[in-house]
Amino acid sequence: MLTKAIILGLIGVFCILDSRMLGRLNFERPLITCTLVGIVLGDLQTGLAVGASMELISLGLVTIGGAVPPDMCMAAIITSGFTIMTSASMETALGLAMPIAVLGQFIGVVGRTVLGSLTHVADKAIEENKFKKATSMHIVWGTIIYSLLYFVPIFLAVYAGTDVVEAIVRFIPAWLTDGLNLATKFLTAYGLALLMSIMLNKKMTVYFLLGFFLVGYLGLNITAIAIFATILAFILNSMKSVPAVSGGASAADDYDPLEDDL
């Protein structure tokens, strides 16, 4: 358990530093994070299932201005780890996800407060021409604090053991668990609605309805629909790339350089 707790803590550090030091490779997305946890713990299928569910939930979380959203990255690591190690149901896992995400949100607020104080220390160091000290405030100490804010909670949660987690789950009233499960379903629907509001338009709606009815009436799974959709996209794209031919002349023959001036 000690080794697993350390490894999961390091995964958390790696994922949270993704958008802060490594560019943005999307390792902090719940789907990828849970997949990494599933690979480490030897249950990739469960990791993918938990990650897909939490990815849909996270789509409904919108960050406005400087607000700190619920930490779905930390929740994804702890929830997927608990689900794999305890063989818990998906409902129980998602019921734990939101409270952990809110806890991660609180930790994130505290961490940003501490990091804000480092900015003032760096400003003072610059005024005193202590540039190495100013650089260390951001590059070294900022990275260490961010890493500890993730490593410590994940390590303690996993190292506490599955018995403690199961006791906490049994202590939670049934009405609260049912409410959290219902809330996750609403967030999932809201996340899909946000995604559809961005992607759907008059041209794309017909393809969405086509995929929906193929699943509903033909019983095809999502993988088959994705394969057919990819083939259809290549066909439509190739049809658009073929130049129009009219009266045996190509489109290049009708080119008029004066049209550029217009």
Image (cartoon, grey):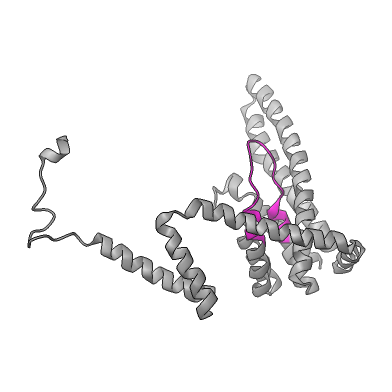
Image coords of residue 30 (percent x, y)? 64, 59
- The residue shown at (61%, 55%) is 191
- The residue shown at (75%, 47%) is 149
Q: Say which of 182 and 260 sits in front.
A: 182
* On-image quarter of the N terminus: bottom right
Instruction: Tell me: 69 left or right of 170.
Output: left
Magenta stretch, residue numbers = 54-77
Residue 157 occupies quadrant: bottom right
The answer to whether residue 27 of the structure is visible from this angle is: no
- The residue shown at (68%, 38%) is 67
Image coords of residue 248 (percent x, y)? 7, 62
Is 69 colored magenta in this rendering? yes
* On-image quarter of the C terminus: top left
Image coords of residue 99 (percent x, y)? 79, 54
Residue 113 occupies quadrant: top right
Q: Say which of 117 and 254 sits in front.
A: 254
Q: Residue farthest to the top?
A: 127
Image coords of residue 187 (percent x, y)? 68, 56
The number of callouts visible is 0
The answer to whether residue 169 of the structure is visible from this angle is: yes
